[in-house]
Image (cartoon, helix red, strand yellow):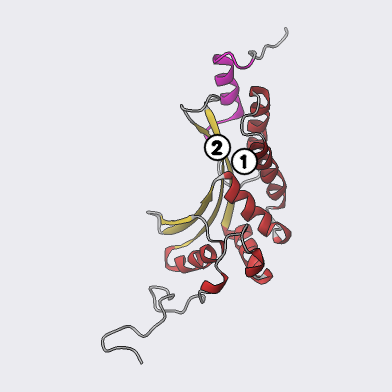
Amino acid sequence: MAAPGSDPRPKNRLITGKPCLSYRPDIRATPWEGQELIQPTQIAYIAGFLDGDGSIIMQLKPRKDYVYGFQIKATVSFFQRRENRCVLEYIQSLLGVGAIRNRPDGISEYNIEGLEPAKQVLELVRPYVILKRQLLVQAPSIIDELLNDPKPSPTKFLELAKRVERCQALNYSKKGKHTSEDVGRFLSSKGLLAPVTTED
């Protein structure tokens, strides 16, 4: 029996008072530790959510402290109206990684950033994803190459930057602010790559 004055309702409810998904602390696990604790139906649910209300984002981010001037960044994102934030919290409780933020436009956004976390999540949902299947092939292959060779040659890094652009083309969102041409110009300006010339 609840103490006088306390709220007897479960904590995992929407602010509207409607019941939300039940939390299962016993199945909380990161995808790369104890995957057997996440049920296949739950993985399929996450994959479907990613297909419909999620993004697989590969970006070229300027970094002054990087020798090549840019960082290749991987993010897996899920989106939902703020009143349904608890759904994102449920997914987060299963994956055990990432952070959720409330945007000013009334949308809650769950982001899993970093090459290794993104790779593990993508590998987890890969058997069930349909709409973003091409991204589920291309993005992890870029991530794998960066993890296996954290310091690629300038030529290899430029090749990876071009593949990042191809991943961006598969997204419904707008193109990235920075392109492989930006990377090539930077590498050339630092003498790391021969300038591209054309014959008349």
Where on the picture, by quarter, is residue 41? bottom right
Check residue 121 in the rendering and tell me which mark sits there, or answer none. Answer: none
Percent position (x, y) of residue 74?
A: 57, 44
Q: Which residue lies furthest to the left in this view?
A: 5
**Does 115 appear above or below 40?**
above
Q: What element carries label 1?
A: helix
Q: Does the magenta stretch include residue 181?
A: yes
**Image-based side of 80 in relation to 15, left or right:** right
Q: Quadrant for the N terminus, please.
A: bottom left
**Image-based side of 30 in relation to 20, left or right:** right
Percent position (x, y) of residue 176?
A: 55, 37
| CB atoms of marks 2 and 1 within 8 Å | yes
Q: Quadrant for the C terminus, please.
A: top right
Q: Is residue 134 magenta?
A: no
Find the magenta span and give its range.
Answer: 175-193
Taking depth in this image into account, of 69 and 35 the one nearest to the observer is: 35
Look at label 2 and name its amino acid.
Gly
Q: Residue at x 51, y 58 (%)?
A: 79
Q: Residue at x 73, y 59 (%)?
A: 127
Percent position (x, y) of residue 160?
A: 66, 32
**Does 56 appear above or below 12?**
above
Q: Name the residue under label 2.
A: 176
Q: Give the alpha-carbon distance from disc 2 to disc 1, as whole Å.
A: 7 Å
Taking depth in this image into account, of 121 and 108 the one nearest to the observer is: 121
> How many C-alpha atoms fall within 10 Å of the one at disc 1: few (<14), some, or many (≥20)?
many
Q: Earlier in the sequence, mark 2 or mark 1?
A: 1
> How many C-alpha atoms fall within 10 Å of the one at disc 2: few (<14), some, or many (≥20)?
some
Percent position (x, y) of residue 165?
A: 63, 36
